[in-house]
Amino acid sequence: MARWLSSSGVDQIILAVNHLSDKLKIEVGHSVGGVTVAFSVEETPLGTAGPIRLAANLLGKDDPFFVMNGDIVANIDIRGMLAMHEKRKADATIALVSVPDPSPYGSVLTDSHGIVRQFEEKSSVLSTMSQVNAGVYVLSPRVINSIPVGRSVSLERDVFPKLVRNGRMQAWIHGGFWYDIGRVSEYVRANKELLEKQELEAGPDNRQNEGGIVRPSHLGTRARLGVGTTVGPFTILSDNVTVGDEAIVRNSIVFEETTIGEKTIVEDAVIGERVVIGKGSRIGRGSIIAGQLSVPAGSVVSPNSVILC
């Protein structure tokens, strides 16, 4: 996300954090993807709007700013979104995306001028409105003053309805890709589809297998592959991942600084950061292994296992 924002001209992001905030500060640091990072720490959870009020001293007093959910992956044109927000003199602009079934998200109804007129809450009943909240907003500074101090407040239930009643909320319709990766299954799907999209855009000359890499796959910087390894298809090795001799890693996502031992097989799995998987292990399909764990040599992890400690 930081790289996406940086490419769109954003030079500072503020992370609203609560749980594990100290660990996040260490992991993220003060800069990522060319963007300066500041932290706003909630002592108690403040909902989706309360953190904005808490971070008011870190925000500019005159310029609009973006608010984004941390669990989306998208290519929303935020430059265009900001330009329209300023042109329409809106208090808030919300990105909307069309989905086949809006019931898990709730729908948004706009008029012919793109002004938001109604929010429909999440429902088990299939709605006729397919535009949903994409989790990206532009807010004008005056919105901050409408957020109560020191308590949990919801943007969606407390702040936005007032703006809608006053006709002060504009919609930006996004036609590109968009994924809600708050669920592991959607996170995996997003990565696979983006790998495939990247491969198609690269053209046929880049689709050949090389050195045991079966495309589409992605290798981060300083990823190291042993002799006779097979990586891919649909595999992501993050930075500083090491795969031992004759190991096989397919349809999997492996986070930073993880080591996979020789002659190990990993299929359809998500492996966290700084994991060590011992020699000759078998990681079953659909498994998830949390970060900073060690899996002893020769282990057999059953399909669909979740290992957190």
Image (cartoon, rainbow, N blue to C red):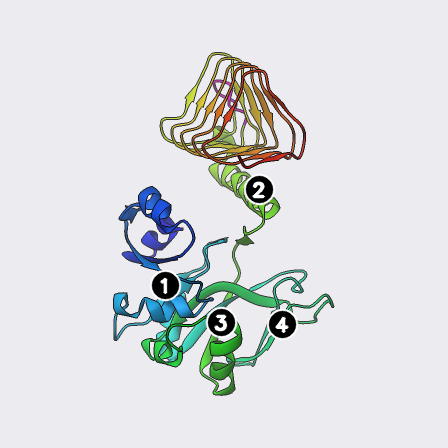
Q: Earlier in the sequence, mark 1 or mark 2?
A: 1
Q: For mark 2, give the secondary structure.
A: helix
Vertical position of residue 142 compared to residue 40: above or below: below
Name which residue lies at 61% across and 34% down. Answer: 287
Residue at mark 4: 121
Q: Position of residue 218 (x, y in %)?
A: 47, 32
Residue at mark 3: 154
Vertical position of residue 223 compared to residue 72: above or below: above
Image: magenta residue range: 209-214
Q: Earlier in the sequence, mark 3 or mark 4?
A: 4
Q: Earlier in the sequence, mark 2 or mark 4?
A: 4
Mark 1 residue type: Arg
Q: Residues within 10 Å of mark 1 (few under 14, many from 20)?
A: some
Mark 3 → mark 2, Cα distance in angstroms:
29 Å
Q: Residues within 10 Å of mark 3 (few under 14, many from 20)?
A: some
Vertical position of residue 213 compared to residue 181: above or below: above
Mark 1 → mark 2, Cα distance in angstroms:
28 Å
Q: Quadrant of residue 180?
A: bottom right
Q: Position of residue 233 (x, y in %)?
A: 57, 29
Residue at mark 2: 188
Vertical position of residue 79 compared to residue 236: above or below: below
Q: Position of residue 296 (x, y in %)?
A: 53, 20
Disc 3 and disc 4 in contact, CB within 8 angstroms: no
Mark 2 residue type: Val
Q: Is residue 213 magenta?
A: yes
**Which mark identifies residue 79?**
1
Mark 4 residue type: Glu
